[in-house]
């Protein structure tokens, strides 16, 4: 979909660790944050590969718009969009090649900065978001008279050019998704998924998904699904391809932490986990079972006890585990000690790991017994990766599992939940918050501070002690990092001291 590590390099690492050869376009052809993909060169690359593989997984956003950001900002005419959809329809592929695709429904964020939406969204995003909520409610015939007046006020007071631009692009993208769903109905794809980019229970994204679902209600979910989240779909469909090529349907048991669990509606999602997780298991080509003894994969799901999810940079993300979490971890440990394939989806917080939960897991010696760990970005993104890696785990040697886990732990836990929090606080105190979205000349300083935080954490836990790695900011912003060349030295330099005084301000670190 674009060149972010979670969409490009990391899924390739996972699949190659499981023994598959993966072909991708050269990175220079893919979208970056600021530059759309060269769609014509992508088409030529795809057409050159279309008869030389066992299965193909494609991002239609890359081929039609030029990437995810371009799907939100493009000005392509309807005729050109139709031409590109028809080109997919006419793509010549050998009948024995399994063909999978995914697209996105435009997101409806509460706010957005850093030029990943049209420029006006930085100023009027909250108003557009509220307008979107009311529009969805009106479509459901559930709005109050006062809310009906509020919609009218937005339509009168929002700059007509801004609202028209936003709605016109949504309508174009909606029409493209209808056409892609029709191609799935016609059998052009063995399976097609539409991902709901960041959305909410009331939003244009939610409303558009409902309308497409109604018009495709007769299509089996073995052929077509609309799923929450987008960034996980590449790996999810690669996993489905692997399962179908090997005629396997891994059985997955869902194991929630105590609390509201499956009733949790995560940030950036319109569905409770109890609905969305089974949908993702089906998308990956798996089956749901209701006993861990019957499962090939135990999907361990760390959710907030009360169902309220905050960003991992929240001050509530402290380094102590609740009694409920300790009980859950003890039960999880018994499974891990028996060699059960457990993949952990750490979604108590958005955009990073749960400090208390992971500290407890690590100090009890359970982290390195997991088959996979994920805690990145939205809950749906995390869960999709956790499902995929859990299913692929039997094909991945333990050494490679640990390498992949170190990468995610450094990124999702050490960086996102700790380094990003401290750096954000510093930038805001210095009135330099804008640099979060475009690092530019601040990049060297931010990188130095991020490395210092990560290294101080890494030395405290066996799974990362003595680890060498490289860190970069692939989109020149604070939100995502690229962790590469992860290696653990034979002589681990673990911090044996229980005291972490002066180590990480406001982020205590405990060790055995």
Image: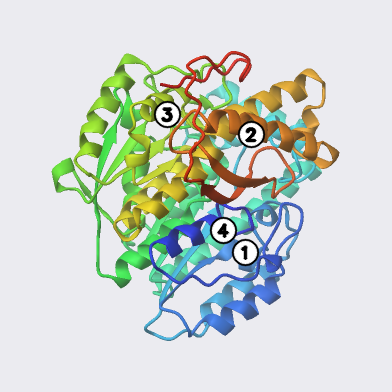
The location of residue 435, given as percent across then percent down, is: 79, 34
Of label 3 and label 4, which has the lower sequence position?
Answer: 4
CA distance separating discs 1 and 3 = 36 Å
Specify which label sits upstream in the sequence, 4 or 2. Answer: 4
**Residue 207 can be seen in this image:** yes
Percent across and percent down for residue 97 are 40, 80
Choose between 93 and 375: the one closer to the eye: 375
Local SS, label 3: helix
Q: Which residue is mark 1?
A: 62
Q: What separation in Å lies between label 2 and label 1 (alpha carbons)?
A: 26 Å
Q: Residue 101, percent across and down?
A: 48, 66
- Residue under label 2, please give it: 129
Q: CA distance from mark 1 to mark 4?
A: 16 Å
Q: Residues within 10 Å of mark 3 (few under 14, many from 20)?
A: many
What numbered label is drawn on residue 9? 4
Q: Which mark is residue 358?
A: 3
The residue shown at (76%, 25%) is 427
Q: Nearer the viewer, mark 3 or mark 2?
A: 3
The coloring applied to the image is rainbow
Q: Which of the two residues, 395 or 317, is positioned nearer the viewer here?
A: 395
């Amino acid at each position: 979909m674009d060149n972010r590590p979670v969409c490009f390099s990391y899924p390739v690492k996972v699949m190659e660790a499981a023994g598959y050869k993966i072909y991708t376009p050269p990175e220079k052809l893919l979208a970056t944050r600021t530059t759309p993909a060269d769609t014509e060169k992508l088409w030529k690359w795809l057409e050159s590969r279309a008869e030389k593989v066992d299965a193909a997984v494609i991002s239609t956003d890359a081929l039609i718009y030029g990437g995810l950001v371009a799907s939100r900002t493009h000005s392509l005419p309807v005729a050109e969009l139709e031409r590109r959809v028809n080109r997919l329809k006419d793509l010549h592929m050998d009948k024995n090649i399994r063909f999978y695709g995914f697209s996105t429904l435009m997101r409806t964020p509460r706010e957005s900065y850093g030029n990943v939406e049209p420029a006006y969204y930085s100023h009027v995003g909250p108003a557009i978001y509220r307008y979107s909520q009311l529009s969805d409610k009106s479509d459901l015939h559930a709005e109050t008279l006062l809310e009906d007046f509020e919609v009218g006020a937005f339509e009168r007071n929002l700059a007509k050019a801004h609202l028209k631009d936003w709605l016109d692009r949504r309508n174009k993208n909606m029409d493209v998704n209808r056409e892609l769903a029709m191609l799935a109905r016609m059998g052009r794809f063995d399976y097609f998924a539409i991902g709901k980019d960041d959305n909410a229970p009331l939003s244009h994204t939610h409303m558009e998904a409902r309308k497409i679902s109604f018009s495709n209600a007769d299509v089996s979910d073995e052929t077509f699904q609309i799923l929450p989240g987008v960034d996980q779909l590449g790996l999810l469909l690669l996993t489905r391809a692997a399962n179908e090529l090997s005629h396997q349907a891994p059985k997955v048991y869902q194991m929630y932490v105590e609390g509201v669990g499956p009733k949790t509606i995560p940030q950036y999602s319109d569905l409770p986990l109890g609905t969305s997780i089974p949908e993702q298991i089906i998308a990956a080509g798996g089956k749901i079972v209701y006993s861990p003894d019957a499962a090939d994969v135990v999907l361990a799901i760390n959710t907030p006890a009360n169902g309220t999810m905050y960003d991992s940079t929240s001050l509530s993300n402290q380094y102590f585990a609740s009694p409920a979490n300790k009980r859950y971890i003890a039960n999880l440990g018994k499974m891990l000690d028996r060699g059960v394939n457990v993949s952990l989806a750490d979604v108590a917080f958005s955009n990073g790991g749960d400090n208390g939960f992971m500290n407890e897991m690590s100090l009890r010696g359970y982290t390195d017994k997991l088959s996979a760990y994920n805690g990145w970005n939205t809950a749906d993104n995390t869960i999709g990766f956790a499902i995929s890696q859990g299913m692929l785990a039997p094909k991945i040697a333990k050494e490679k599992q640990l390498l992949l886990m170190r990468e995610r732990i450094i990124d999702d836990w050490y960086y996102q939940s700790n380094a990003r929090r401290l750096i954000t606080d510093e930038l805001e105190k210095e009135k330099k918050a804008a640099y979060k979205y475009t690092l530019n000349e601040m990049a060297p300083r931010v990188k130095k501070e991020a490395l210092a935080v990560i290294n101080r954490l890494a030395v405290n836990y066996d799974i990362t002690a003595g680890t060498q790695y490289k860190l970069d900011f692939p989109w020149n912003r604070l939100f995502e990092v690229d962790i590469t060349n992860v290696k653990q030295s034979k002589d681990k330099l673990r911090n044996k001291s229980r005291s972490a005084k002066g180590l990480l301000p406001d982020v205590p670190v405990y060790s055995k």
